[in-house]
Image: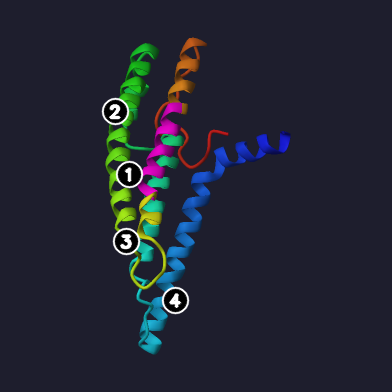
């Protein structure tokens, strides 16, 4: 049981970073190898232009989730830092509501697109891979974004109720809160 808890804690701390690094390394490797193959041998794998673009989707949405986690997403941090605790909490709640509205919208419509691609058996050109595997990155990334902003709101409400300083966007730039 302790091992499962440690695994879940490790995943909570590192899932976004792991997805970002793995997708970036694979994407960069494909581009690097295919440029050499194209320039030196006049060859190119037919899938080598599509797969890096699909991997970029994973990179983008999981990076957004990571930045939501560490509060380095776009915000008006300078203004909020000067606010008293209750108005600051209200701003964080308003942020949360905006994230949820946008997230539900994005998840709903991107899941619809994933289902269309799945039902039409859309394939990544030159491979046996289904395109919808990669398109799942957008709704999955947004699920992680909503999870992170929910955790931030719970943390802010707890800090407010204890009379502690609320998390200010951008205060954790360059690292995790853990």
Marks 3 and 1: CB-CB under 8 Å? no
Q: Which residue is mark 4?
A: 33
Q: Which residues are magenta?
A: 137-150
- Percent across and percent down for residue 152 are 45, 27
The numbered mark, 4 or 2, whose residue comes first in the sequence reads 4
Q: Nearer the viewer, residue 42 or 159?
A: 42
Label 1 secondary element: helix
State the residue at coordinates (35%, 65%). 124
Question: Crowding at label 4, few (<14), some or many (≥20) Cα neighbours within 10 Å?
Answer: few
Observer-side mark, 3 or 2, equals 3
- The Cα–Cα distance between marks 4 and 2, rounded to whole angstroms, is 42 Å
- Percent across and percent down for residue 173 are 45, 39
In the image, which disc is placed on residue 111?
1
In the image, which disc is placed on residue 98?
2
The numbered mark, 4 or 3, whose residue comes first in the sequence reads 4
In the image, which disc is placed on residue 122?
3
């Amino acid at each position: 049981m302790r091992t499962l808890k440690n695994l879940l804690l490790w995943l909570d701390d590192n899932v976004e970073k792991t997805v970002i690094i793995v997708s970036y390394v694979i994407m960069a490797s494909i581009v690097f190898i295919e440029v050499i193959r194209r320039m030196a041998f006049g060859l190119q794998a037919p899938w080598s232009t599509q797969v890096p673009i699909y991997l970029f989707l994973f990179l983008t949405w999981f990076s957004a989730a990571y930045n939501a986690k560490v509060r380095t997403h776009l915000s008006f941090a300078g203004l909020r830092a000067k606010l008293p605790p209750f108005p600051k909490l209200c701003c964080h709640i308003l942020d949360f509501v905006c994230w949820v509205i946008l997230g539900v919208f994005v998840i709903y419509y991107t899941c619809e697109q994933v289902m269309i691609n799945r039902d039409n058996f859309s394939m990544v050109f030159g491979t046996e891979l289904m395109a919808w595997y990669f398109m799942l990155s957008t709704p999955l990334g947004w699920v992680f974004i909503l999870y992170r902003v929910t955790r931030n709101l719970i943390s802010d409400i707890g800090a407010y109720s204890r009379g502690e300083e609320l998390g200010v966007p951008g205060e954790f730039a360059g690292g995790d809160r853990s």
